Every structure is written in structure tokens, then in C-alpha cells.
Amino acid sequence: MGTNGKTRKRPAPPTPAPATPSPQQKQRTTMEEEDFDEDVFLEETLLQYEEEDSQRRALSERLEKWKRPALSSSYLTHSQNIMFQQLEIDYVIGDSHKELLSNSSGPAAIIRIFGVTKEGHSVCCHVHGFEPYFYINCPPGMGPDDISHFHQALEGRMREANRNNKVPKFVRSIELVQRRSIMYYQQQSSQPFLKIVVALPTMVTSCRGILDRGIQIDGLGMKSFMTYESNVLYALRFMIDHNIVGGNWIEVPVGKYKKTARSLSYCQLEFDCLFSDLISHAPEGEFSKMAPFRILSFDIECAGRKGLFPEPTHDPVIQVANLVTLQGEDQPFVRNVMTLKSCSPIVGVDVMSFETEKEVLLAWRDFIREVDPDIIIGYNICKFDLPYLIQRAEVLGIAEFPILGRIRNSRVRVKDTTFSSRQLGTRESKEVTVEGRVQFDLLQVMQRDYKLSSYSLNSVSAHFLNEQKEDVHHSIISDLQNGNSETRRRLAVYCLKDAYLPQRLLDKLMFIYNYVEMARVTGVPISFLLSRGQSIKVLSQLLRKAKQKNLVIPNAKQAGSEQGTFEGATVLEARAGFYEKPIATLDFASLYPSIMMAYNLCYCTLVTPEDARKLNLPPECVNRTPSGETFVKSNLQKGILPEILEELLAARKRAKADLKEAKDPLEKAVLDGRQLALKISANSVYGFTGATVGQLPCLEISSSVTSYGRQMIEHTKKLVEDKFTILGGYEHNAEIIYGDTDSVMVQFGVSSLEAAMNLGREAADYISGTFIKPIKLEFEKVYYPYLLISKKRYAGLYWTNPNKFDKMDTKGIETVRRDNCLLVKNLVNECLHKLLIDRDIPGAVQYVKNTISDLLMNRMDLSLLVITKGLTKTGDDYEVKTAHVELAERMRKRDAATAPNVGDRVPYVIIKAAKGAKAYERSEDPIYVLEHNIPIDPHYYLENQISKPLLRIFEPILKNASKELLQGSHTRSISISTPSNSGIMRFAKKQLTCIGCKALISNSDHTLCSHCKGREAELYCKSVANVAELEQLFGRLWTQCQECQGSLHQDVLCTSRDCPIFYRRKKAQKDMGEAKLQLDRWNF
Amino acid sequence: MAAAHMEVNSENDAIQRKQSLYKSLDERFGIQKEMYRGQQYSQIYFARLHLMRTLLYSLLPNWKPHVPVCTVLGLEEGKECIIVGTIYKHMKLKPCILDEYSKERSATPLVKIHNFTSSDDYLVLEDESGRVKLCGTVLLPSVYVTGSVIALLGKETGASDFMVDDILEAGFPHQIERPLVSGEDKYVVFVSGLSVGGSSSNPLQFQLFIDHITGHLGDEKEQSFAAQIVQVVVAGNSVEYPSALLNGQNLSSKDQSRLSEPIKELDILLTQIAAGIPLDIMPGPNDPANFCLPQQALHRCLFPGSSSFNTFRSCTNPHSFELDNVSFLGTSGQNIDDLEKYSDANDKLEFMERTLRWRHLAPTAPNTLGCYPFTDRDPFFIETCPHVYFVGNQDKYLSRLIKGSEGQGVRFICIPRFVDTGAAVVLNLRNLECHTLSFGTELSP
């Protein structure tokens, strides 16, 4: 199973899809995050033999020392409660447990909970007896007889639809219950609903399909039903019903669990129990701690062929490096590397060498099994490393390799998935299911949580860890592999570093704490946080809350897309300029959540227009929102969303208060992770109601929220401008210069920071008093000085206390865009620094002029001019010719081995070319440019790269910015280097010239012509000064690279084009050689 | 080599200048034939380790006769052994060229520090096979620097660190015994940091110095002292350029000629010395020479006047020579100044002593000290123990006679900057005694 190409988007197995897909089903494909359960049949996943090889026994002895701690006797004799932190919950279809469930038989869903005890034992808990269900509206007048008719009819239809299934009874029961729909304000407290319990989780979907389309019921005729909570994943349903949240502690009391008759997993503690016997602990106090789970960080190296990216069909896996760390400890306790062919030892690392690739792969599998990691991390492991290993094993025919999960003989399943969300766009990915182990791909996390200019491991590490990583080009990996055990050791060290950095990132950015906290707050399993979008988190909270209130949530997605869009947030017009007086900023704290709370906006408080007429609610009990919707006030019906938000924000307040108290850094980390998770969750609630392709969109709510938001910003503007006036007794008239979604910038006119801060506080208090609680306007900071360029583009110094500024804050200015060359970023940063911090406008202008002059005079460091773009497909697939694609093609013609491949980033510079040449023809590889002295095109950089950002900054400040900066006398001298390999230079004959005046000299023994002879000392000084400068640079650059690679005795191999000094280093090496030759001419 | 002689007085009782036998040993510091061909710095470390390891291995039988010797790779947990390798010091305060590219420019510029050591520094030992982190209290990170090669006794701990129990440094090299010459006093004068053309240089002060040593000043007693000076050594930083000229921008032709003014002035002054006394001039960091060690001799074209005398020798930095079989080794100060930035000691002489014990003139090259990327040798390795070891351009005069374990006697001298102190150092070749010669408003030799 798993290899037969099943995809997520198929109807329940093993039924074939209905012959005519309904329009509704068509729509499904466009929807975000359609969740389907997919039943995995235990028997099908297992290999029927267990392969055991005496040859590998030696290896297993070597691995043995990394086993988990042995069980104590009270565990062995089952005389102890089993308490563990769960990390992963899934389910499998197996036979229902005869002892625990005496009165049922046939296949049933068994929940599996994987976790770790506080002693570090691995746990696999099989939970029996929880049955999947959903609700439908009970048609009026349906009596008990009708229900049994209905049951029969449904059973019949289900049997028809699932012909191959041998389940004795598809629809286990239909029960009449009292519930209420979450949608719309209703006066009656409940209505009859039917709870339909089915045998297997996938049947929920197929049953829903039947009910959606309509079913013939005796006595009632053809009827179709709206289903409720039929889109809830089975495992999540179980968690919700038993108050289990992601990553919490679960306890099974003594006597309530039974050791499994046949051990199915590799876990130390494996047992069966009834779903009703589990005790779930809320993650508070003692139970907020983390179990010592094992985190494996790994990386693989493949020997690619020249010029091609490694493919599992051809290229062997040559090394796998592993680090295993216990949660909470700062050093890994296992470091090893498995290599193909011999490899010299590495201090502190267990090097295991093998002769065949099969042995390497199987050793890794054995290692995984022995060390039994709970979490697997790495960089791009989900898309590359794991699928590669699995496909490679398939190519090599190693059937027993992909048993990496915790279930005995169960093979890993790989499938292609597309993940799309509004926030992140569509992403293709591979989903590798490793049962019982959580995968945490740091690349995915980075892309999700941070906006960076590059996501290569090198630049991410440089950004967060301040550590550069040696980057070995994949074209030389094969060379290193084909060398000797020393070169392979080199590669192993590199591979280890790639395994080490993700672990460091994980620690440094506290992802484990933050994500576990997020799972606990929102109630979803940890694995959902990376593989799903935001809405599942809100849905999980909504379901939990609704359950308490006896509410049910309709599965009504189709309503979404037809509702169209709504007006977004307001941005007050920006009065661009350079403000040299303090600008106070008034912020709404959590604006959208507070609006929802203040006005009781919820699904269950929304009154439909018909109801509004019908119910005749007194006006003091309802709110009319500025967008025209009606919601009842909380005295009639308290909304669920406001309640969720209140709890989230109250919890955040508590966490923040505890954070202040906390001393222990670990505790601090947990609390900080928690308050952050709470904040993000609170903010995602609004988004959930507005996601038109989401689970339960309700644009009435989201458009009301934004309309209130707009109103508040306008209201604030008006109040400030009315109250803070000279007429009102203040020194100046206050002016609103700009307002964004949830903040307003005020110029009170005072020139001291302190006065501005006091006025800001006064204004915030005054205006807050006019809002309904908990909407609150806060004074947070003053910008001084403040450069407002346009909407969403500004820069300023950020002050929270009048003595010292906190930082320089910029928004929307070219400081991080990755399409720009580094020069732009440096220039903009430096200018802002000079303008805002040094308050030196002439200095900034001079700096710009010097930089432009350096650019025109060819004195610019090439690495500052490199532009990079990702190559996403090959040249033929692009419709428009672009610089980087054209260059990649040209480079392939020169040398296929080092040319960039799809997926690489292509660095290039724009060179000078014939007049009229298109921009895409003028791109060139920076290395090639260096080696051949090709002149760059300074005008391209001046016009297309730096002029716009510069003018944006300087226009509010200078009158004739463009004239002053871009056309002054500093632009008059230009120097362009002569290329050494193109055009006429190829026919030129090199002759010695006088160093002083460039006159030709015939006698090669001489350095100077007769005219310059007298200036000998002076000219020598100049030459030698040039050499001295280069030598200094050469030394600093090359020793830095030794530092990065972590070795003094080995040559630097790194070719990381992401590294800021890579081109400089190359250039220094080349220039040095030339300068030395030049200097040597003096030694006559 | 020919030694010069001159007449101090035109009268009959002319005092004859003494002479001594000079032999240059600078050849190994030359880089005339070497080229930049894309080589890196790994080779010089390799050459150094190779030389030093052979040396240290030969000392092991007398140090710890029965302890096995391992490579870093061969370490086994808990097994006592000796390892030999290059020290790498991990320093968090060490300036890094990548900082120029750091994403956030800090609002307040860092205070410029002159010493980059911190309590978090730790040492790593590296050989061709790998690295191991060193721990234990025996080995002080503040003393050692990246690039020194030593032998260590200890064992690998469970945390894959190497617990150091004892250290072996190569120690002072073997010394060729100093010939017991007659009771005749002969003096060598050292001067450095003349900074001709610099804002604080005082032309009169230097002229006084010249007149004094050439015997144009003072009474007969002083003149007869001057006549006993057999050699003058100028140890670096002889000129200084106005800083406004060197800001990286293109120079106008007028400024270009100003660039060679200090050197012209220096030439005139040195001509006066060279006319009377043998003169060695070494380049220093401010001189018109290359930047990397070994700095090559200042070009003769810079000294049209003084180079016409055969007493004038333009030398390399480091500089090594013999005078009447007394051997001299010295630098213009970069090696010791760099050690001061990256390690701690009580005074500069202690740094000097360490370099001699480590048998390496400039251990921090190439790591933090500019150095030519040699491919097959390490010219800074000290093969034999000099009798006199001097460094130029120091803050103050310091000198000590230090005895080695094999009875080697070495005179260590820190030559103060003349421009700041007005002092030169005089060494008596007979007994290696040493004193300063100060020139100020008052003459006090």
C-alpha cells in the first residue's frame, strides 16, 4: 500500500467515484484544505516477513548503545499508571478488540497515540471503541419509526456504494439528539438532530455524499440533507471529544490498559485501552513540561552526474549524517555519519563505512529503528532527502528499506501533495508518512514563519546564527567521493554540518517550544501545524467550543465563493514628507479581535435579514454594523468567536504576566512560545471568517470587522484633530499625517519627545474612553525623525522612552527585496542611517555621490552588483526571455557541469554590450566577468537599480533630488575596464608600457620611459601601495574562509554564491596575481 | 662584507671608526621568485606543522618516554596519549570581514578595542586529520594564539573534548655559542618609528641623532663613543604620509608628487648616516613596501642618495644578520603587536619570549597577520637561537637578557618609536648590554 498512487483527493476507497460528478464535487478541487480521512488497513501495510540478517548483527551491536533507557519493573509488571506526552495521533483499521469490546466485531478504526514518558520511554497506545460520526438536521415530524426506515435506506445505499467492503454494518446507529446549528441567531435553544455513527472514518465522506445528493426514504420521499461536522478528521474528532490537545500529557490508569497480544510497533510500551479510560491532562503546571523526546537531524549527500541535479533513478546516496538530541539538552548525544566506501575518522563522530549503497541505506534504517526518534528534522527533508532515500531504495530493489516508522514492517508511504493557502500560495510537496514520528522540515518552517531574501540553508544560518556554512558545489561532490578516504571525510564533515545547522536553528529559534505551544493552544496535532494552513487551527477551537455549547457546525463550504469580496482595511492618505518633529503613533491593540469581542460578532449572533424582520428584536439588543449587518448583543446570545478570543487573549495576558515572573530560561522559552502562539491564533480568527474558500466562511462577520476598523480609524482622526487644537488650549493644532490598518500617526506639533509622548498618552486614554471595551487605543512609540514616503512606505527612528531610541524602523523600503543587488540595500541603509540617526542631509547626499562616482569609475566591489533570481524551469518553458534564464542557457553551453540547474538561484551582473542589446542579453556570470575583465554597465545599475529607491527617499527632503543626485559633476568621469577576450582585444598584441605614462617601451627590461624616469620613487610608491592594499584584503578574505570551513590545513573548497565575500575573494586572488607581476617589473 | 670607516676629525688625532664583520641572513625572507597562482593558506600551515612536528617528536623521549603518540583522529576515549598539532583559538570578539555585510548596522558604533581576547575563548588543536576541542585548566587560552604548534598530553573525554594534562613547547632553539671576543666595545644602534613627514615628527631631533652617532657633536669622549658604533639598524616606519592623501580616492598629480616627499627627505637624512656608518633599513607597516610579511626590502629607487653608498643595505622585515658572529633577528613590530591583540602577557618581552619558545616569529600569520601564501616552506620558523632579538615600533624601551634551558643567552629588545620618545637603543656587542640614547631639548646620552 502506499505505492499504488493513491492521492488525497480521491473519494473513499475502495469505491469507484460516482459516474457523474456533481458540480459540487468539481468545486472541491479548487478548495483549500479539503480534509479527507483516508483509511489505512493495517494488514495491507505490513510486510509479511521480517528480514533478519546475521551480517548486520555486528552493526546492530554498534547501534545498541543508543537505545532508549530500559523499562523499570513497575512498567514491566503493569503496576504503574502510564503517563506520556503524545506527539502524534493517527488511526488504522483493524479488527475490533474482542476483550475490550465484547459486543462488536469486524473491522474498526483504532486510534494510535504515539508519545514519550517522562523517563524517555516510547509509547504506542491503541485506543479502541471510538466511532466516527456526524450530524444531520432531523426533518420535522420524523418519528422513531421514520428513523429506522431512514437507517435501513442509508445502510442500503452505503452497501451499494462500498460493495467491496466486508463491514457487517455500515451505519452503526442513528440517534435523535438535541443540538443547534452555529449559524445565525436563533431564539429556540435546540432542535432535533440526527447523529449518524458509521463503521469506518472514510464512510463519513461517502455517507455525506449520499445525503448531499438525496436519498429516498420510505414515507418521506426523496430528501437531501445538509450535514454537520462531517468534514472533521477522525483523529481530530477523537481529540476534540476527549479534550486532547496537540502535545499534551495523557494518562492511562493501572488496570485499564492491556499489553498488546502481538506487538505491532517498535515502541517500548505498547498497549490497548478503551477510549473512555484515557485521562487527558490540560497543559498547565506540571503538565506544561516537555518529555525528553528524541530529535533526529539528518542530511544526505548524493553523487550527481556532471551538470545534472541528482536523480534517484541514477545517482547513488553516498553519505547520511545524523545527529540525535534529547529535547531540552544543548548537545546532541549521537553524532554519526554513514558513508559509502571508506572514510577517515572524525573526532567525536561515529563514522560507519560500507561497501555498497544497499548497506548504507539499511544501516540508516536500522539506526532509525534503534535510536527511535520522535521528531525528524532537517533542511528540505520532506521534498528532497526522505523521498530520495525511498525512491533510491525502490530503484535498488531494497523492499525492506522503507520501514522507518514505528510500526513493525509497515512501509513508509509517499505521495505528492499540493498545499495551497492564501497566505503562502500554492506549493507542491511530497508527503512522506512515517508512522509515529513527527517530521519537522526547517525549510518549510522558515518559509512559513519568516520573510527572507533567500531560503538557502547557508543564508538562513548566516541570518539567524551568524554562521556561514561552507558550500560545496554539487559538481565536485562526486569528485570528493571518488577520491580517497580523506576526501570522503571532507565530504562527511560537510554533510555533518548540514545536519547540525537545522538542529541549531531549531534550538535558537525555539521552534519546538513554539510549535508545541501552538498545538496546545489550538488543539491540533503538531504535524498539522506544518502540513496545513491556518484555518484548521481555528476550526479545531471552534469545534471544541461549539461542543461545550451544544452547537453543531454545518459543512457549508459551497456558500463561500459566491459571496464575492468585501472592502478591506482603510489606509488614511499619507502626507509624504520628512518630519523633523516627533510623530506619535497610536495603535489599536489587537484591533480585529477586540472589534469582534466588543460587538459580539459571531456565526451564532448574526441575524439574517428575514429574521431581522420576523423576530422584531428591540433595537437596544442588536448592533447594526457599518456594513449593514445585524448582530445581537451578548445579553441575548453570547458569541462563540468572542468567547474564544477572550480566552485566548486572557491566556496571553496570563502568559505574559508569568513570563515577567519567570526566572528559569527554559520556562521563559515555553511561556514566550505560548504567548506568541496565542497572539497568532487570536489574529487568525478573523481570517478564518473571511477565507472564501475556507471551512466556514462568513463574510457578514469579516466585512463587519473591517467596516468597524475603518470607522475607528476615521473616528480617531476626527477626535484628535478636534480636541488637540490651539482653540482647545494646546500649543499647536494636531495633524494626522498617516493612518494604517490599526494605527494612526499624529503630529502634535511639539518639538520635544517628552511632550509628544505625554500628548500621545493623553490622546490614547481620551479616545479609548469613547470605544466599547475591549477596544483600546494605545500609545506605544514616537517616530522622530520620520520619513514618510507614501502608503506603507516609511522610515523613522523609533522611541519608546525619551532618552534613547530603540531602533530604526523601516517599512516597504528596499532593504530586504531579493531582486535587488546588495548595492541598493547598502546604499539605502546607509542613507537612512545618515538622515535619521546622524541627521546629516549633506552627508547623505555626499555619500550617494561618492557611491555613484565609485560605480561609474569601476571601483565597486562586484559582489555588491550581483543580482540573483531563482531558476524555476528551463529556458524553453519561459514565455518571455529573462536575464537569468538566458544566462543559464549560455553557461550550460560553456560548461554543463557548473551551470545552474532548475531550482538553483542564478547570480548575474549586467555587462556593457553593443548599443541596443536587450537587457536579457547583457546578463553575465560574475565569475566569468571577473576572469575576463568584462566591463559592467554602470548606467544599468544607476538607472534600473539605484535611482528609484534613492529618489523615493530623497524626494521628500531635497528639492531637485533627481538633478542633484543623479546628474551632478560626480557623474562626469567614467572608467571602463578593457575586456581581455572579446571584440578587438582578441587581435591586440600586448606590449609593455611605461607604468607612469602608458607610453610604449621597447626594452622589456625597463619599467619607465625616459620621461618618467625622474618620477621613479613616486610611481613606485603608487604601485607598492596598490599591492599592499590588495595583500591586506587577500589575507583577510582567505583566512575568513578558512575560519568558516573550520580547518587550517585544508584548502577552501567553498563556492557559496550566497556568501557576500565569495566574489571578492575570487577577485582578490586574481588582482593579487596581476599586481604582483606589475610590481616585479621594478626589479630590474 | 666591506665595513666602512671614516674620519671623524680632519686633524691628526683622528678617531678611527671601528669595524665589524657583517653577514646577511635575509635570503629566506625573500619572495622574488614566488608567484600568486591561486594557492591558499593551507600549505604554509602544513609546512609549519611538518617542521614543528619533527622537532617536537624528537623531544618527546625526554619529556614523556612511554606515552603513545596519536593523531587527532586516532584519539580514543579515556586513553592517555600525546598529540601534536596547530592551535586554533576560537574568539568571539575577533573582528571578521563578514561583519561589514551584517544586516543590521548597529546604531551606536562599537568602541574600537585593541585586544580581542575574552573569557569565552577556547582552544582547538588541529592536525591534517582533524580538530579536537581542548579543555582543562593547564592550558590557558589567553596565552596561546592561532598558529602556534605544540604537543599536548592528555585524554579524550566522553564529550569528545581533549583534557589537557601537560604541555610541551618546542623551547628555545639551539644557539651557536657567541665567540668570546677581546674586551673591545662595539656598539649597534637601533632606531625605529622615525615617521619622517609625519605631523609629530621633529626634524631637529633626528638631525641631532645623526650628528651624534656620526661624531659631529659632543666632546672627545662622546666622539670616541660614536666611533665605536659599527652598525645602525632602522627597524621600520621610517616615513609617514599625511592621512588626507590616502583615502582611496584618485589623487591629483600634484598630490601624487607630494606622496614621495617624505621618502625624499628620509633619503637625505639617511645619506648622512650611510656616509659614515653601515646602515640597515627595514620596511615597516607604514613604509612604501608590501603589506604582507615578510615585507620585501624597500626599493633602491626610493633612495637615490643613500643607495650610492655600499654601507647602505635595504633589508627585509623580518631581518636576520650576523655581526662579528653575533646573530641578530628582528622585526619592525607587527608580529608582536598582533600577538598583543589576540593574547595576553605582562609585557611585550613576554610575547617575544613566547615566539622564541614556539620557534616561530609570527605564529598569527596568516590568520590575523598578513602573510604571503608560501607553498613549500615557512620562513618564520626559527631554526637557531639568535643572540639578539629585537622588535621595532614599540611604546617604550624594554630589554632583558633571558637564559634558555640549554644555557642559550638572548638579549630581547623592544625599540621605542623615535617620533614619540626621541630614543634610540644602543647595544654593546661585547657583552650584549643595552641602553637608550635619548634626544630631546636636553642631550642626555
Image (cartoon, rainbow, N blue to C red):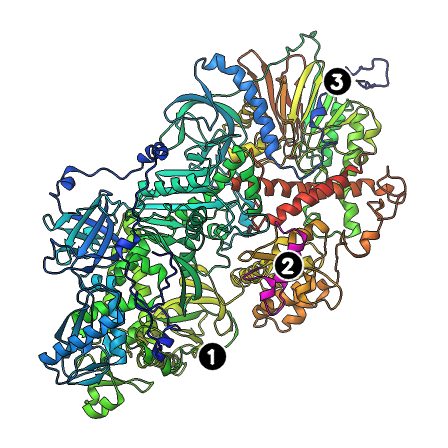
Marks 2 and 3, how far apart in space? 66 Å
Q: Are marks 1 and 2 in contact (CB under 8 Å)?
A: no
Chain of the residue that carries numbered disc 1 in the rendered image: A
Q: Earlier in the sequence, mark 1 or mark 2?
A: 1
Asked if residue B80 is positioned above or below residue B88 in the image, the reply reads above
* Tag of residue A889: 2
Residue A579 at x, y percent in the picture? 50, 71
Amino acid tagged 1: Glu
Circle 2 chain: A
**Quarter location, residue B325:** top right
- The answer to whether dots 3 and 1 both sit on one chain is no
Q: Is residue A238 above or below residue B357?
A: below
The image's mark for residue B358 is: none
Find the distance from the CA under tag 1 to the CA under tag 2. 46 Å
Classify residue A268 as left or right of residue A968: left
Q: Amino acid at mark 2?
A: Glu
The residue segment tinted magenta is A869-897
In this rendering, would A1033 be left or right of A630? right
- How far across and how far down the image is residue A1015, in percent? 83, 43
- The residue beneath circle 3 is B22
SS class, disc 1: loop
* Residue denoted by label 1: A573
